[in-house]
Amino acid sequence: SSSEMRYQEIEKTEAELKFEEAQRQRQMERVSKAANKSHKDRVSEFNQKLEKLSEHHDIPKVGPG
């Protein structure tokens, strides 16, 4: 299986390899950033985002009440 992976790596250009490495780095940064936030922090950020939206995005009031 490792020989197959080496064969695939050889076919990739230098730019493709750099791009994949950059993607891996960005993904690791996102994962570590997300791991540092508690659920309470994420909910708070989401609520702040919702507060900034216009009323157009609110749930429509339908029916009596």
Image (cartoon, rainbow, N blue to C red):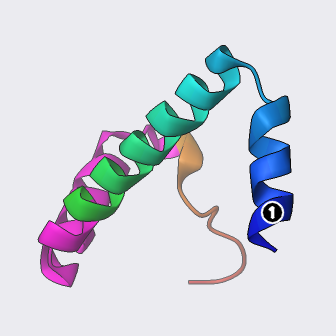
Depth check: 44 or 12 in front? 12
Depth check: 19 or 12 in front? 12
The answer to whether residue 49 is above or below residue 35 is: above
Q: Name the residue under label 1.
A: 3
Depth check: 32 or 22 in front? 22
| Region rendered in magenta | 34-55
Q: Which residue is drawn at 13% across and 69% down?
A: 36
Q: Residue furthest front?
A: 3
**The N terminus is located in which quarter?**
bottom right
Per the image, is 51 magenta? yes
Whether residue 54 is visible to the viewer of this picture, yes or no, is yes
The answer to whether residue 58 is above or below residue 17 is: below
Q: Residue at x 46, y 32 (%)?
A: 22
Figure label count:
1
Q: Amino acid under label 1?
A: Ser
Left or right: where 2 falls relative to 41: right
Left or right: where 17 falls relative to 48: right
Q: Where is residue 53 in the image (x, y as percent from the top left)?
A: 41, 40
Q: Residue at x 54, y 25 (%)?
A: 18
Whether residue 47 is visible to the viewer of this picture, yes or no, is no
Say which quarter of the image contains residue 61.
bottom right
